[in-house]
Image: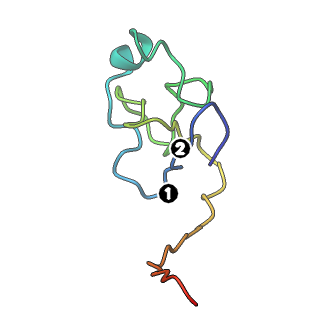
Amino acid sequence: DNGGPTQTHALPANSPAIDRAPSADCLAAPVSGVDQRGQPRNLDGNGLPAADECDIGAFEAADGEPPPPMNFKVALPMVVRPGN
């Protein structure tokens, strides 16, 4: 989780989703210029000039942002049987 009303997946620095969406699409409703956390969209996430500087998905990466931590949760099935 990276903040905001719902959980998000931060983008790794080498993600193909960084700077792939047209900036105009990110400014239009329902996105309205912010990501799921309320952070501004249209941040240059890879430091390269481009017309498309909005990231795909709920998370907008910023240049110089630390990479997201790797957290894993494992759920194992459990069988409960009534005892004596």
Q: Judge depth for marks 2 and 1 and give the one in front.
A: 2
Q: Quadrant of the C terminus?
A: bottom right
Tag 1 secondary structure: loop
Q: Is residue 18 left or right of residue 22?
A: right
Alpha carbon separation for disc pair 2 and 1: 13 Å
Q: Is residue 59 left or right of residue 66?
A: left
Eyeballing the image, is 68 above or below 50? Answer: below
Looking at the picture, tell me which residue is in the foreground, 24 or 82: 82
Under circle 2, the secondary element is loop
Q: Position of residue 22 (x, y in %)?
A: 32, 24
What residue does disc 1 label? Answer: 12
Residue 72 placement: quadrant: bottom right
Q: Amino acid at mark 2?
A: Thr
Q: What is the x, y in percent for residue 79?
A: 45, 81
Amino acid carrying label 1: it is Pro
> Which residue is under mark 2?
8
